[in-house]
Image (tube, helix red, strand yellow):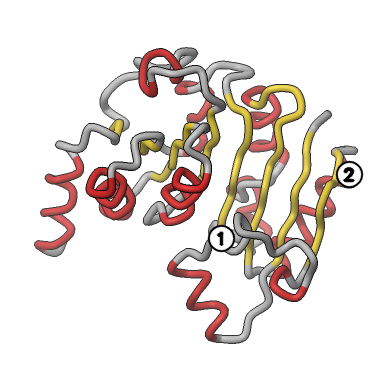
Amino acid sequence: MGKDKLRRFAEVNTFSNVLQLDAGKPFKGCWNTGFFKNANPVVLELACGKGEYTVNLARLFPDKNFVGIDYKGNRIWRGAKTALEDGVNNVGFLRIQIETLLDYFAPGEVDEIWITFPDPQPQVSREKKRLTSSRFLDKYKLLLKPGGFINLKTDNDGFHAYTAEKISEIGLNLHVKTEDLYHSEFADEVLSIKTYYEKKYLKENKNINYLKFSFD
C-alpha cells in the first residue's frame, strides 16, 4: 500500500464525521438524536466513493442529514475532509460493506437513497452484487420510510436496463426514467451534481442514465 493511502487511512480515523466498521453500531435507530443531533430527514448515498455527491447534496439541503457509505477508507477521506474543512455539518460517512446496512440502520430510519455510478457487476455470476438486485432492494424496502425514493445515476446502459427490468418485475413505482439525463427535462440542480467519474464519462461522450423509483 502506498504512503499516501496509509496517510489517509490514519487521518480518516481521527475524523469526527466518519464511523469506521470496527466502531460498533452505536447509532442504529438513533442517527437523528445520536449522530446529527436533530430531527431532519436522513438520506444515504451508497458506494459514495470520494463523497462528492454526499457533500454537495448536504450543501444544497442544509435541512437534511446525509450519510455517505463506502468500504474504502482512502476514498471516504476526501469527502469527509472537505466537509470538515468547509463546515458542512449535516454530513457523515460510514465505512462498511453495503451488505450490512441493516446492522447500522433501523427499519424506517431512512428517507431517501442515492446510488451514484456503482460498479455495474456485469457478469451474470455477480448479479447478487449489483446494488439494485432483489437482495439489496429487499434491504432498502425495510430501511426506507413510506414514500421514500431511490435514485440511480449510471453511465452503464446495461445496469440501467437491468434496474428498469427489476422495477417492472417487482411492481415498484417508477417516477423518472431517462437514458440521456443531460439532454432531458430532468437535469436540475440536484441531478447536475457531478462526481469525479461522471465528469470523466462525460468527457468520453457517454450518456448518463437516471432512474427514480419507490416501493409505495
* Residue 140: image location, x then y, percent: 65, 32
Quarter holding residue 30 = top left
Q: In terms of secondary structure, where does tag 2 sit?
A: helix
Considering only vertical position in the picture, is 107 above or below 134? above
Q: Nearer the viewer, residue 191 or 99?
A: 191
Q: Identify the residue at image location x=69%, y=36%.
A: 137
The residue lying at 83 percent from left, 47 percent from top is 175
Residue at 63% in and 45% down: 128
Residue denoted by label 2: 169
Q: Quadrant of the N terminus?
A: bottom left
Number of other residues with Cα within 10 Å of mark 1, as a class: few under 14, some 14 to 19, many 20 or more: many
Pinpoint residue 155: horizontal percent, then vertical percent. Answer: 63, 69
- In which quadrant will I find the C terminus? top right
Q: Give whichever of discs 1 and 2 has the lower sequence position.
A: 1
Which amino acid does the dot numbered 2 rest on? Glu
Amino acid type of the residue that numbered disc 1 sits on in the rendered structure: Phe
* Front of the two marks 1 and 2: 1
> Where does label 1 land, which residue?
117
Q: Position of residue 121 (x, y in %)?
A: 59, 59
The image shows residue 210, relative to residue 77, as above or below, that is below
Secondary structure, mark 1, is loop
Disc 1 from disc 2: Cα separation: 22 Å
Residue 185 appears left or right of 130? right
For residue 18, above or below residue 124: above
Please tell me how many numbered marks the rendered image carries.
2
Looking at the image, which is closer to me, 48 or 61? 61
Q: Which mark is residue 143?
A: none
170 and 185: which is toward the camera: 185
Residue in the picture at 80% in, 32% down? 215
Few, some or many C-alpha atoms within 10 Å of disc 2 (few <14, some 14-19, many ≥20)?
Answer: few
